[in-house]
Image (tube, helix red, strand yellow):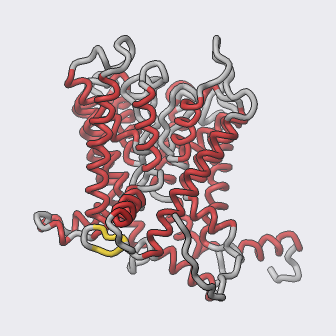
Amino acid sequence: MSSAATPPPLQALLRWRQQLTVPQFTVVTGLLVIVAGTLLLASPFCSTEEVGLWQALFTVTSAITVTGLSIIVVDRDLTLFGQIVLAGLIVTGGLGLMAITTFLQGFVQGRNGLRQRLDKGRALDEFGVGGIGPTFNSILFTATCVMAAGTLVLYCFGFTDIENPLQRLWASMFHVISAYNNAGFGLWAKNLEAYRDNTVVNAVIATMIVIGGIGWRVTNDLWLNRLRLRRLRRLSLHTRLVLRTTILLIVVGCLGLLITEHFGYEAQGLGALSIWQKLQITLFQSVTTRTAGFNTIPLSADTITDAGLLLMIVLMFIGASPGGTGGGIKTTTFAILMGATRSTLEGRDHVLLRRRRIPDGTVLRAVGVTLASVLFVVLMALLLGIGPTAGGVPGRQAYSFLEKLFTCVSAFGTVGLDLGVTANLNRWGQLVLMVGMFVGRIGILLLLSALYAHRPQQRVGYPSEDLYV
């Protein structure tokens, strides 16, 4: 069709499409996937009459951002086909919205100018010189193998109480998909509380969460150096930093929750359990708190101490690792901030990590990500406090600030842990959480890049001047 025969609105749409940068294209694609998923999930093929457009929108947003916050019960409100669609959305979001949309961009946009090549160059930087295609195929192959192994173990040794073989297979597959992609969706209303003392279920789900959370770059580095792991220096700095920080956060989280909940509520908390039960629960919760969202014990302000909730907020805010399926500010960002603090205390003007100097630009990005994330979470908490945010809960008018803050961090960090707040919020509160989930999954810097992509770079140098800090 010639340009003369093309209607003016379509011409404008084509010009707008060609002007999109990679960050803008990623945001637009994510929104389109959410809209399409909402219409599909709200159809009678996928859900019961209890699920309207709003419930479908919230569920799809939570799935595509691999969060796990839910206002429906999956096995009750969704048909088998709807559950399969939900799992597909989780995989789509977990494998990386950035990788998928950037890979598809070459087929959608026809322009190949200098700006486009520079944008793609920055995007390809995350995937290595092999390009997005081979890397994405490798990510998909690795994920398939890991999830298949996890499904097999859960089917044979985990969900043995499910007598129907097909139901057991689907339960194993769904929860492994949700765990590997750090989504936290469970088929049942009480998540994994029925398997609190099942060591196999706890171990498999936690292992899937960790493997998905550390990212393909780390697992690929470990696989390539699998015969030389005794010499850790052969691993990249990124791999060593991610592994050390992940292990440290898991241990600190486990011990911290063990201490805070040991002195907690005897009746409903962990106080009345044995030391082995406490250790297994706190270890699992330490792993899942950093963006997975599963729970094996009831979570509420009545069952978890304030100190425990605060510790979980910190773990959720830090989150998983770059390139992984989780959210948060990332483990490497946290490690860089700790390294910058140490360098400041030691009087150095540069940051050292594992005998390597970190570029100033990387340090600035870490500070920018953290500060922007803090401000965004604070804004979410403020918006959640406007008007009546609690509804349908007999005997209470509103939730406490700690409960609201916990829910906001859970949404922004794409964690999915809930204190019973989400389903009882009005639509304004749930809208705030949806925006937080989307921004948390896209990434605060990517979103800012999409909004300010057309601003020209400053070419003027300015004199420096010191400040008192």
Residue 131: quadrant of the picture: bottom left
The residue nearer to you, when weighing 64 against 411, is 411
The residue nearer to you, when weighing 275 against 61, is 275
The residue nearer to you, when weighing 131 against 199, is 199
The residue lying furthest to the front in this view is 468
Residue occupying the point 33% across, 32% down: 257
Percent x, y of residue 67: 51, 43
30 is higher (above) or lower (below) than 80: below
Percent x, y of residue 430: 66, 36
Residue occupying the point 16% across, 64% down: 226
| Residue 223 as seen in the image, left or right of residue 174 | left
| Residue 194 as seen in the image, left or right of residue 414 | left
358 is higher (above) or lower (below) than 408: below
259 is higher (above) or lower (below) than 362: above
Residue 169: quadrant of the picture: top left
Percent x, y of residue 104: 56, 69
Q: Quadrant of the N terminus?
A: bottom right
Residue 21: quadrant of the picture: bottom right
Residue occupying the point 54% across, 78% down: 120
Percent x, y of residue 225: 18, 68
Q: Is residue 43 visible?
A: no
360 is higher (above) or lower (below) than 403: below
| Residue 99 as seen in the image, left or right of residue 156 | right
Residue occupying the point 25% across, 72% down: 355
| Residue 118 as seen in the image, left or right of residue 273 | right
Q: Is residue 415 visible?
A: yes
- Give the total number of marks visible in the rendering: 0
